[in-house]
Structures are given as structure tokens and as C-alpha cells.
Image (spheres, rainbow, N blue to C red):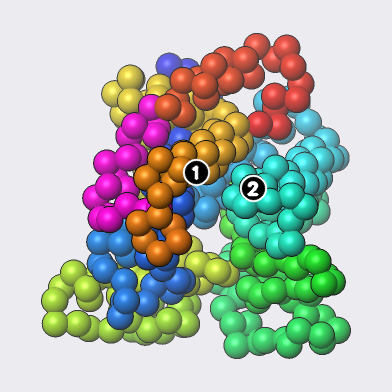
Amino acid sequence: MAPGSSRLAAVDALRGLVMTLMVVDHLREFFFLHAQVADPVDLAVTSPALALTRFASHPCAPVFVFLAGMSAWLSGQKHGADRLGVSAHLVQRGLFLVVLELTVVNFAWTFTFPPSTVYLQVIWAIGVSMIALAGLVWLPRGSLLAVSLVIVAGHNVLTETHLAPGSTWHGLWAVLHQRDWIVLGDAMRLRTSYPVLAWMGVIGLGYAFAPAYARRSPEARRALCWRLGVASLIGFTVLRTLHGYGEPQPWTRYPDVLTTAVSFLNLTKYPPSLDFLLLTLGVGLCALGWLDRLPVRAAHVLQTLGTAPMFFYLLHLYLLHVAYLAAFHLFGANHGSRFGFDSVWQLWASWLPTLALLYWPTRWFAGLRRTGRYRWTRYL
């Protein structure tokens, strides 16, 4: 396999891998909402099994945003685009994702129109981060890397800064760093589920990392990923063990090892703390260094999912929501006003069958996209 195709295959495979983990978490959102967990997870009311199920999906958003930065650079190289072309594409793509979040994605979660509440979640965060990256790409690579590192490593300094609703800068601060509600009127409010400041740093790191990754041999790329990944995991372990800077939620020793481990891994995602990003990106980089050694058949499945990420994302949300409504209609409410699984193992038992249902239409769309016949398919 040529170095170029190997590089893209590993990136696509990693994107596909985190998307499969995302499905588990969204199965939880639809079929285990009666036992909903908060962030950080409250171990007083949440079982370790459910908490670990939630944690399994934690690498998804950081890795996906990081790969969005990598893909922006790789796409620019593939199409011979200069900085102006890359910047323009990022603005167009970012605006598209923001509109998609406000419309198609929000409807997939709520099945309510017109909506009274709009949740600004991961697709919104990626879109806004792409628009920010459109400006950052004009910096020299070293400066872009430095700015991105400062954002990722330094944004926790702002954790204790809170602005009250109604204050002049509350809306902007809620979008950037303070997860909150923005009330637009009696009939509409926004929930900034994913404040975007830290994600701007993550997408910048991906863009800065891409040329260092792409210009190495396969062996050197694997070594680079493993060095950076292990360094990130060591940094996380040290900061977390010392209860130091980087995570506002302290961990606690419990009588049993499992609950103590869950507490240690209980990190703030909204907005993502430095510890959260060190752990998840460290795992992601190690996986990127390992995935190009997967058996061909397994790699092909993940690459197929990773080459049509937005199609897969939209399809799985609508499939899960329709499946939930069908189950509710057939079996009725068995947990208060909702239908839901009784045990965590049922989430995992449903995982592979759900992926099988999603794989074949995603494979069809990925093939259609490769033909290049329809320009709009580039956006999905």
C-alpha cells in the first residue's frame, strides 16, 4: 500500500472506530435515559458499569475534532489548495455544519418542529471550530501550534469565571466556555452543550500535527503517534494523581478498586478539561499508530464508516430515534414514562446489530461519494 493511501486509511479507520463507540453512548441516550448520568458522573447514584459505558465514548468528540483538523490540511494538500482556498473551504464547511446542527441534527434528537429548545452539540462545535481554524491557518505553523497548545492547556484557568444570564457578555461566554442556557425569547432557548473554546484548540492541534504525520514513513508515523500518545497519557496520569491543575472535579478513593478507577476517570467533558483531552487524545494517538496494522477486513469496515462520517452520524440518530419510538409503541413504558433497557449489558448486546444495520447504507454512500459525481456528497 502506498504511503499516501496508508495514511488516509489509518485516519479513516480511527474516525470509523470512534464512531462505533459513539453508537453505544447514543443507544444509552435513547434506551437508558431513565438512568441518565450527569457530567461529571455522580457515583453516588450511578453504577460503575453504566459509568464505564459512558466513558467508553469519551474519546469520540476529541478524536473527531482532532481528525477534522488533520483532514483540513490533508484535503488542502490533495486538492492543491493555497491558504485562501483552505480557509474558504473551512468557512463554507463550518457554516454548513452549524446550520445542520440547528436543523437536521436537532430534529433527529427531538422530533419536534418548530423546536422550543435547540441544543448546540458536537456538530455545532466542529463547525464553529472550523470557522476559527479558517483564521488560524494564516499563522505560521509554529504559531498555530503554540496558540492551540495555549488554548488546550490554559483554558482551565477560566473555569471559575461565570457570567450571569442577562449580563452583557453572557451569551458569548456561554458559547465559548460556560455551558449554559441562552434565552432568545418566550418560545426559544439555546443550550450550549459544547462550549467551543477548547475545541478550537483541539482542531488547531490536528491541523498542526497533520504535516508532521503525513511526511513520515509508515514506521516513523507509528513511532510519532505512540510517543505523543504515551506522553499525553503520562501527563494525564501525573496531573490526575496529584489532584493538580487541569481537572476541576477531584477523584476519591473508595473501598473497592473498580469504583476508585471510575472516580479517577470521571473527567469534565463540557467544556473538556485539560485532563480529559490528555487522556482521550492520548488514547486516540496510540490508536492511530496501531490501526494501520489491523487485518484487512476489519480495517476495511472501519475505513468505510470513516469515509462517510456525517452520513453515518445522521443515519444513526434517526435510526435510533425511530427504533425507540417503535419499541415504546410495541412494549409501552416500563421505566416511568419511558421505555428502556433494564441492564447495561443490553446496551452492548444491541451495539453490533445496530452497527450492522448502519454499515450497508453507509457503504453504499461511501461508494457514491468516491465516484465524485455529486459535489454535495463531499459535505457528508
Say whether residue 200 is magenta.
Answer: no
What residue type is disc 2 on? Phe
Numbered range of the magenta stretch: 339-356
Q: Main structural element of the magenta stretch: helix, strand or loop?
A: helix
Q: Are marks 1 and 2 in contact (CB under 8 Å)?
A: yes
Left or right? Give the position of 143 relative to 209: right
Q: Residue at x 64, y 19 (%)?
A: 369
Say whether residue 348 is magenta.
Answer: yes
Q: Is residue 225 above or below residue 35?
A: above
* Sequence-first disc among 1 and 2: 2
Residue 339: x and y in percent read 40, 53
What is the C-alpha distance between the residues marked 1 and 2?
A: 11 Å
Residue 79: x and y in percent read 73, 25
Residue 37: x and y in percent read 41, 68
Corner quadrant of residue 178: bottom right
Q: Which residue is mark 2?
A: 111
Q: Residue at x 78, y 73 (%)?
A: 183
Q: Is residue 315 above or below residue 377?
A: below
Residue sitting nearer the eye, 234 or 161: 161
Left or right? Give the position of 345 relative to 234: left
Q: Residue at x 70, y 74 (%)?
A: 181
Badge 2 marks a residue whose secondary structure is loop
Corner quadrant of residue 197: bottom right
What residue type is disc 1 on? Leu
Left or right? Give the position of 346 relative to 26: left
Q: Which residue is mark 1?
A: 325
Residue sitting nearer the eye, 27 or 19: 27
Badge 1 marks a residue whose secondary structure is helix
